[in-house]
Image: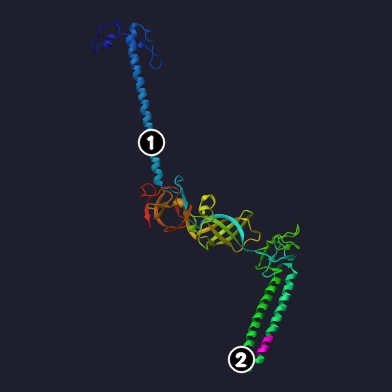
Amino acid sequence: MDQTQHAPGQDTEKLQNGNGARKDSPLDKLPPIDQAPLTPPGQIDDDDAESALAYQSLARHRKERRRKKLVRTAIAAGIVAAIVLFLAARSLFSNGGSADNPTIPTESVYRDDFRESVSGTGSAKPREQVSVASGLEGEVLSIDVAVGDTVSEGQILMTVKNDGLGEAADEAWYAYKDAEAAEDAAQEALNAVWYGDDQAAKDSAYIALKKAELATEKAYSAYEDAVKKAEDRTVRAPIAGTVVSLGGAVVGQRLGTTGGSEGQGSANTGIQLADLSQMSVVVQVSEVDITKVEVGQTATVTFSALPGVVSDAVVSEIATLSSSGEGGYGVGGNVTYAVTLLIENPDPQLKPGMTASVSIDVQYIPGALCVSSNALMTDDGETYYLLVVTDPATGATEQRFVTVLAESSTTAAIEGNIAEGDAVQSGIGWTGGEPEAGMGGGSVVY
């Protein structure tokens, strides 16, 4: 290897031969870096060792520069992505949930009858139901009605044969007439001595008359009792209504006895009458909702056995004490109170015992301006406002305060500087604090 040192500026000359031709450089023997792999140590000539070392150093520097360039590119891409996300988020909130931006939903203020209800289930019952029995010993002589018949007050339901009652009434009549005759005789005796001088005779006749009058009164009272018992053999309807049960009564049945032949029976549960012109439903209302219920509130009632039938009802009674049970607890261990509702005009298909589902209108505002509860905003839990979209193109909004007249779990009835059809932000899920710039918090209007 040529170890000759060259002074600066003489490299060009030394690289040329004597004929002026350029000498071959040791680096010229190396392949391009990007096209040939590094030659393993020991496979190059000693004359080329310096060139190989230079080549390897150059390759390492290029590889390091390439790695750093990739890292810088990745960092730059992350920064650009973060900027894009930031700008998108700022654009989202600055639009304020306009009608053209579905990310922040909007809704329209609408007018409707606002209702908040308390629900419950129960069974349909007649408003009034009575059991009618003769209460006498005897034999059923006739049954003058059938189940389903409509009867008027005083109408005959059945008759009972008991000849002894008739005979007793006749005997009581005769006893009364005898007492009445004795009273007449006592009166005549008093008249006979009234103008005489015997005062003792007068007093005695007067006392006898008074005793006779008392005996007559007792005899007449006994006669009335006998007649009433005899009349009880004819069983009449105490109310107008519908026959819902005969109570097991059959013609020939012995009543009011402890014996009786097999097949006749002696039970006398009575004929069941019900006033089906009006029906009632009793539902259990929890202690959480009972304070919302008042007598006179309206309700709607549906029946699982009568699809499509809807009856109007009104709260007629609210129990003061909680429903019976250990500790006053109702079904499921919750404290409940019985609420009775009256159905004044029941459907003719409705029968006692049918399952009823009741919805009581505890709040009712006809023709109210309504929005979803999600649209209501508040900063202090006492005053409420809406974010009204004033420019759908830009999403600009203004804050308008409203009065909440009533609110259910989903809907609020409101009044204030708001109109039907106004577009408002809803479902943002943000309350409390002052509206920030870029979140639709434009001007405030009262």
As displayed, is residue 260 above or below residue 177?
above
The disc at residue 320 is: none
Image quarter hosting the C terminus: bottom left
User: How many badges with numbers are in the image?
Assistant: 2
Q: Residues within 10 Å of mark 1 (few under 14, many from 20)?
A: few
Q: Nearer the viewer, residue 401 or 388?
A: 401
Q: Which residue is mark 2?
A: 199
Q: Residues within 10 Å of mark 2 (few under 14, many from 20)?
A: few
Examine the residues drawn in magenta and state their main secondary structure: helix
- Give the quarter of the image for residue 356: bottom right
Pinpoint residue 368: horizontal percent, then vertical percent: 48, 59
The disc at residue 82 is: 1
Residue 225 shows in the view: yes
Q: Are marks 1 and 2 in contact (CB under 8 Å)?
A: no
Residue 113 shows in the view: no
Q: First in sequence: mark 1 or mark 2?
A: 1
- Give the quarter of the image for residue 152: bottom right
Q: Give the distance between the C-alpha atoms of the residues marked 1 and 2, in whole angstroms.
A: 134 Å
In the figure, is residue 63 to the left or right of 110?
A: left
Tell me the kind of residue under disc 1: Ala
**Residue at (69% x, 83% y) in the render:** 182
Pinpoint residue 108: horizontal percent, then vertical percent: 47, 53
